[in-house]
Image (cartoon, rainbow, N blue to C red):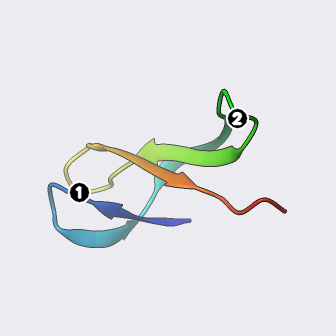
Amino acid sequence: MEAYCVKCKAKKEMKDAQEVTLKNGRKAMKGKCPDCGTSLFRILGNK
């Protein structure tokens, strides 16, 4: 899963990605940037 890293200013492949559920019931992916270690977060579609 790719997400945008604000520190590197580029799209990166997530390391240690895991699916989480937000308070409103939507799904999201949470992981780390492989280069700088910053947290990455991407909201998934409704399906």
Q: Nearer the viewer, residue 44 or 32?
A: 44
Give the crowd class for mark 2: few <14, some 14-19, many >=20 residues within 10 Å.
few
Label 1 amino acid? Asp
Q: Nearer the viewer, residue 14 or 3?
A: 3
Label 2 amino acid? Thr
Q: Residue furthest right?
A: 47
Give the crowd class for mark 1: few <14, some 14-19, many >=20 residues within 10 Å.
few
Residue 35 marker: 1
Image quarter for residue 38? Answer: top left
Q: Earlier in the sequence, mark 1 or mark 2?
A: 2
Q: Is residue 7 left or right of residue 28?
A: left
Looking at the image, is 33 positioned above or below residue 20? Answer: below
Residue 21 marker: 2
Looking at the image, is 20 positioned above or below residue 45? Answer: above
The quadrant in which the N terminus is found is: bottom right
Image quarter for residue 5? Answer: bottom left
Q: Residue furthest top?
A: 23
Q: Residue sitting at 19 percent across and 50 percent down?
A: 36
Q: Residue furthest bottom?
A: 10
Residue 23 marker: none
Q: Secondary structure at mark 1?
A: loop
The CA span between labels 1 and 2 is 26 Å
Q: Nearer the viewer, residue 15 or 43?
A: 43
Tag count in the figure? Answer: 2
Q: Residue sitting at 71 percent across and 46 percent down?
A: 27
Q: Secondary structure at mark 2?
A: strand
Q: Nearer the viewer, residue 16 or 5?
A: 5
Q: Residue sitting at 65 percent across and 33 percent down?
A: 22
Q: Is residue 33 left or right of residue 2?
A: left
